[in-house]
Image (cartoon, rainbow, N blue to C red):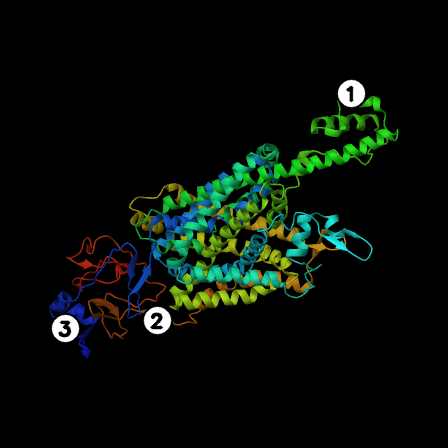
């Protein structure tokens, strides 16, 4: 034994522990110990085993029961409410079918590459967002914390929308539907229609007055809306029960929550195509307006939609992929899920505009009937000559074509006196009024369904679909919060999930007060857009320029078994950062130019009016952005200035216990030949399980190293100077 070696011998419960120095200097003495000890690497279907530094127990990371379950989880997370009520609106607003061209281009340029990036880092490092970015670059470890905060902000108001859907779902089991007709008000002398409803519409009145009971401004709280409070509680209970066991509980629910919306969409599409006027809506939808496609605003909105449609930056994508096997083909998953998301958006757009086309025809028929009566009155009063009316026109059953003919004739003859309080009654005008967001789901779509045969059935199906779409996205959002925290701080997942849901419900009460809808708008506008853009930009830069794009491409080759296309090399290194930075600048400019405010419902006028946020509201808006991004500079400064001691994670000794290799901190003194240097947990290379238990180090003496790349199983030779430190 060399003179400069110190032998440390301890006996604790018959366990044999030797310092690293002894292992290096006295191979023969530990040969029997190695033969008696063994490291089992189980390549089971459901669980992979990670040996964590600093823990005396094996960390058995859960795994998906099947590839289908994983794909459904990713699809459920990425396909959400935005596919149903935002994509159709953007498509209609930005050139119809022509909008699909910039969307597809940007999906290929930034969508799929960045989605592939998040899938691969999660699968490679097998940790949540905090652990992943701590490993990539400890100084940028704040990226993971920022993702968690953004996920929490989004979960706060996203579950409120699920609560709204639950309320409408519960109210759909009655005929006629409660939003079918305006309510009647009785007083001592007469019965009349509710004035607020008469000025707007039955569905609009029901949404603002019966469902939300909304106040006139964000400063007017009005107290809690108890109906919506109960629905929000029910929504959080559903999420908590589904997520309490992680993917073991939520994974099975994915079969229903991810597939059921497609069943409903297909049923709605078939039913919608059989309705009168549905083809008018689809034709209007996909009539390309090529001149609009050249506007920069269209490309900015398409990039934003691609960005949020795939759930980039939330951490949910990374969390789900971290439960995959290491040899899973995540490139195939990225392409598959991205195109499923795109085709889901197109399917939802077909459904929405088929239904809106039917609704526009119903409204147009009422318009023609009312204006025909006005024309008849003008003819009877002598204000119009019957000679100008074609003989074949029958005002008792006039068609849209005949009405447009009569309208054009009257307009030309009475040009000086026109308008005579007549409306053109064009279907295109109604279709141009297509709305987005809650207005589409809870006003326009509900109104259209009141004209369906068996309307309660279709209403139940529609709002159950919204609940499932929302839950699928919520599962990924909550996973983006809990998985990184569990991986980093080793807390019990059940306790963390319940605590997170209780805290979110308590804070979420601000969204179910009478002014809560205005806070939903505020959080939607300011808590996610800019922070998520910055998070994804930092992810891209950290991987491409700090970790190293060449090294990452080698990691992908080792993990996938084949080399990734050079297309991803150039998009990650050059194209995606430039596009994302341009999108960030455009979003900031748009935010500065657009006055911060919200659309308030004015009861007296029965309409929405734009109002600016009060001073405290502006402070809240800025605080949401600042709080979301605060972890990035804080963690950077802590790591930069060495304000936190990371030495606790160093590997100083190896213990052999019950056939397992664990770590025990021991200070080594003066060992120049030691090959295992202290590393912080964040700097420890990613474990890389393989199919083989042993692999030989090239260009060195016969050495067996563990397939996880952390500890050797066979002899460790002191003269192996060419063994890279990362393999230890």
Q: Which of marks 2 and 3 is nearer the N terminus?
A: 3
Residue that mark 3 sits on: 2
Q: How far apart are marks 2 and 3 (CA)?
A: 28 Å
Report if the CB atoms under discs 3 and 1 are less than 8 Å apart.
no
Element assignment for label 2: helix
* Image x and y of residue 21, in percent: 20, 71
Q: Earlier in the sequence, mark 2 or mark 1?
A: 1
Report if the CB atoms under discs 2 and 1 are less than 8 Å apart.
no
Q: How far apart are marks 3 and 1 (CA)?
A: 118 Å
Which residue lies at the image location 54% right of the left edge and 37% below the top edge?
271
Classify mark 2: residues with Cα within 10 Å, few (<14), some (14-19) or many (20+).
few
555 to the left or right of 436: left
Viewer-side label of 2, 1: 1
The answer to which image quadrant residue 223 occupies is bottom right
The answer to which image quadrant residue 368 occupies is top right
Q: Earlier in the sequence, mark 3 or mark 1?
A: 3
* Image x and y of residue 222, in percent: 68, 64
Q: Distance between the residues labelled 2 and 1?
A: 96 Å
Viewer-side label of 2, 3: 2
Which residue lies at the image location 53% right of the left edge and 50% below the top edge?
466
Query: From where the camera sits, is residue 582 visible?
Result: no
Report if the CB atoms under discs 2 and 3 are less than 8 Å apart.
no
Residue that mark 1 sits on: 391
Element assignment for label 3: loop
Classify mark 1: residues with Cα within 10 Å, few (<14), some (14-19) or many (20+).
few
Vertical order, 17 against 228 (above or below) = below
* Image x and y of residue 469, in percent: 50, 50
Which residue lies at the image location 24% right of the left edge and 74% below the top edge?
670
Picture disc at residue 303:
none
Residue that mark 2 sits on: 647
Element assignment for label 1: loop
């Amino acid at each position: 034994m060399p003179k400069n070696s110190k032998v440390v011998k301890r006996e604790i419960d018959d366990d044999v522990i030797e310092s690293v120095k002894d292992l290096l200097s006295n191979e023969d003495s530990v040969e029997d110990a190695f033969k008696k000890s063994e490291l089992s690497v189980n390549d089971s279907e459901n669980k992979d085993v990670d040996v964590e530094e600093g823990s005396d127990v094996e960390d058995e990371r859960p795994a998906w029961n099947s590839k289908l379950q994983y794909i459904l989880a990713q699809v459920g997370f990425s396909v959400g409410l935005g596919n149903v009520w935002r994509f159709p609106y953007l498509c209609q607003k930005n050139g119809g079918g022509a909008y699909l061209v910039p969307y597809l281009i940007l999906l290929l340029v930034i969508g799929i590459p960045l989605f592939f990036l998040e899938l691969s880092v999660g699968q490679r490092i097998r940790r949540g967002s905090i652990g992943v970015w701590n490993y990539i670059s400890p100084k940028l470890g704040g990226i993971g914390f920022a993702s968690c905060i953004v996920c929490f902000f989004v979960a706060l108001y996203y579950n409120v929308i699920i609560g709204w859907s639950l309320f409408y779902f519960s109210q759909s089991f009655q005929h006629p539907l409660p939003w079918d007709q305006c309510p009647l008000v009785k007083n001592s002398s007469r019965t009349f229609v509710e004035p607020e409803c008469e000025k707007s519409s039955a569905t609009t009145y029901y949404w603002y007055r019966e469902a939300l009971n909304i106040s006139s401004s964000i400063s007017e709280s009005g107290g809690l809306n108890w109906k919506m409070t109960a629905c929000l509680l029910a929504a959080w209970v559903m999420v908590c029960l589904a997520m309490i066991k992680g993917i073991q509980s939520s994974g099975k629910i994915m079969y229903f929550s991810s597939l059921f919306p497609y069943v409903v969409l297909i049923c709605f599409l078939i039913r919608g195509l059989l309705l009168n006027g549905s083809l008018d809506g689809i034709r209007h939808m996909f009539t390309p307006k090529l001149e609009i496609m050249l506007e920069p605003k269209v490309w900015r909105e398409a990039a934003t939609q691609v960005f949020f449609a795939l759930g980039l930056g939330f951490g949910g994508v990374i969390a789900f992929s971290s439960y995959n096997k290491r040899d899973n083909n995540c490139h195939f998953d990225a392409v598959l899920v991205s195109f499923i998301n795109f085709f889901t958006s197109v399917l939802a757009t077909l459904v929405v505009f088929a239904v809106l086309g039917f609704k526009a025809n119903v409204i147009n028929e009422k318009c023609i009937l009312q204006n025909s009566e006005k024309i008849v009155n003008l003819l009877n009063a002598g204000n119009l000559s019957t000679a100008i009316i074609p003989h074949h026109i029958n005002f008792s059953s006039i068609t849209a074509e005949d009405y447009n003919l009569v309208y054009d004739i009257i307009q030309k003859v009475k040009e000086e006196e026109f308008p005579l309080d007549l409306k053109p009654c064009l279907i295109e005008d109604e279709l141009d009024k297509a709305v987005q967001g809650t207005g589409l789901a809870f006003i326009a779509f509900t109104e259209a369904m009141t004209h369906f045969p068996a309307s309660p059935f279709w209403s139940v199906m529609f709002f159950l679909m919204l609940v499932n779409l929302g839950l699928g996205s919520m599962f990924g959002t909550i996973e983006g919060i809990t998985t990184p925290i569990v991986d980093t701080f080793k807390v019990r997942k059940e306790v963390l999930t319940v605590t997170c849901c209780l805290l979110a419900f308590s804070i979420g009460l601000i969204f179910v007060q009478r002014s809560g809808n205005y806070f939903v708008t505020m959080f939607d506008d300011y808590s996610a857009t800019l922070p998520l853009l910055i998070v994804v930009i930092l992810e891209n830069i950290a991987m491409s320029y700090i970790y190293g794009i060449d090294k990452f491409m080698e990691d992908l080759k080792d993990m996938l078994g084949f080399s990734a296309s050079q297309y991803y090399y150039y998009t990650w290194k050059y194209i995606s950062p430039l596009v994302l930075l341009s999108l960030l600048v455009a979003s900031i400019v748009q935010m500065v130019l657009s006055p911060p405010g919200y659309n308030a419902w004015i009861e007296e006028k029965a309409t929405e009016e734009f109002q600016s946020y009060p001073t405290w509201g502006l402070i809240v808006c800025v605080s949401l952005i600042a709080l979301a991004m605060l972890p990035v500079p804080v963690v950077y400064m802590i790591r930069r200035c060495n304000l936190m001691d990371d030495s606790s994670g160093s590997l100083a000794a190896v213990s052999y216990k019950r056939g397992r290799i664990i770590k025990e901190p021991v200070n080594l003194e003066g060992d120049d030949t030691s090959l295992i240097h202290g590393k912080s947990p964040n700097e420890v290379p990613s474990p890389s399980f393989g199919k083989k238990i042993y692999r030989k180090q090239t260009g060195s003496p016969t050495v067996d190293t563990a397939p996880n790349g952390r500890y050797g199983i066979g002899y460790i030779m002191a003269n192996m100077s060419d063994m890279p430190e990362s393999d230890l």
